[in-house]
Amino acid sequence: TNMLILPTTLEVPLNLSAPDTSLKIEPLGIVTLNFKGGIKLRIESNIETGLGGFFQKILTFEQIANDPVLGQVTIALRHLETPLSTLEFVSSLPQRSINKIHFDFTLTIEKQPSGGPPLRLVNTRTATLLNTSLEGFPPENAEYSLEHPVDLALLDQPSQTIGQLFLFPAIISLNQT
């Protein structure tokens, strides 16, 4: 039996901040940014194997950071056939679960140091935020990290990788508003 009962179709708005996010972009080198924003998940269905859990669909994901050189840097959800996210129970006493949040995104840099239009990048493989010892759901100041670094390519030339998102230390909590 599920340790946590959540109705399917329940939409869960969450605050997500990612201070000290690090990305590498040619020719800028390594850039550190402080992202703030939100994410909304919907409970899709139950996981029937093991101790149980839930499949989650990501509905919205938006992050904004401001940088004196690059201007506004945004990460926004790309609506692709992204795999469903999972919350799988791994122990009941104490209650622990593994939460994997899968997302595809566009990263937009408002100002290129060399001038020109905003730089639009996309992930080349699905990104996953991971928490391996989540206590309860929704998360409360829970720390998530990238399961693997994510290469970034030009939106209009997806085969041309010019960067990588390699640190995205996210803090996720229920949005109470």
Image (cartoon, grey):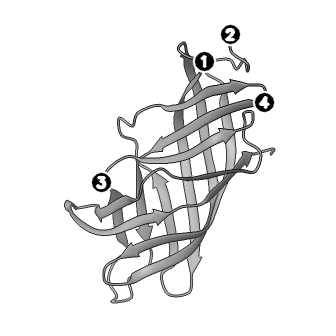
Rendered residue at 58%/23% (across/down): 54
Helix, strand or loop at label 4? It is loop
Number of other residues with Cα within 10 Å of mark 3, as a class: few under 14, some 14 to 19, many 20 or more: some
Between the residue at mark 2 and the residue at mark 3, the CA separation in whole angstroms equals 38 Å
Q: Earlier in the sequence, mark 4 or mark 3?
A: 4
Q: Earlier in the sequence, mark 4 or mark 1?
A: 1
Question: In the depicted view, which residue is nearer to us: 114 or 32?
Answer: 32
* Label disc, if present, on residue 94 of the rendered structure: 4
Question: In the depicted view, which residue is nearer to us: 32 or 38?
Answer: 32
The answer to whether residue 111 is seen in the rendering is no
The residue type indicated by label 1 comes to Gly
The residue type indicated by label 3 comes to Thr
Give the foreground label among 1 and 3. Answer: 1
The answer to whether residue 11 is seen in the rendering is yes
The residue type indicated by label 2 comes to Thr
Between the residue at mark 1 and the residue at mark 3, the CA separation in whole angstroms equals 31 Å
Q: Which residue is mark 2?
A: 1
Helix, strand or loop at label 2? It is loop
Q: Which residue is mark 1?
A: 52
Q: Position of residue 61 (x, y in %)?
A: 54, 49
Give the foreground label among 4 and 3. Answer: 4
Between the residue at mark 4 and the residue at mark 3, the CA separation in whole angstroms equals 37 Å
The residue type indicated by label 4 comes to Pro
* Label disc, if present, on residue 124 of the rendered structure: 3
Q: Position of residue 79 (x, y in %)?
A: 40, 42
Rendered residue at 56%/17% (across/down): 50
| Quarter assignment of residue 6 | top right
Residues at marks 4 and 3 touching, judged by CB atoms closer than 8 Å: no
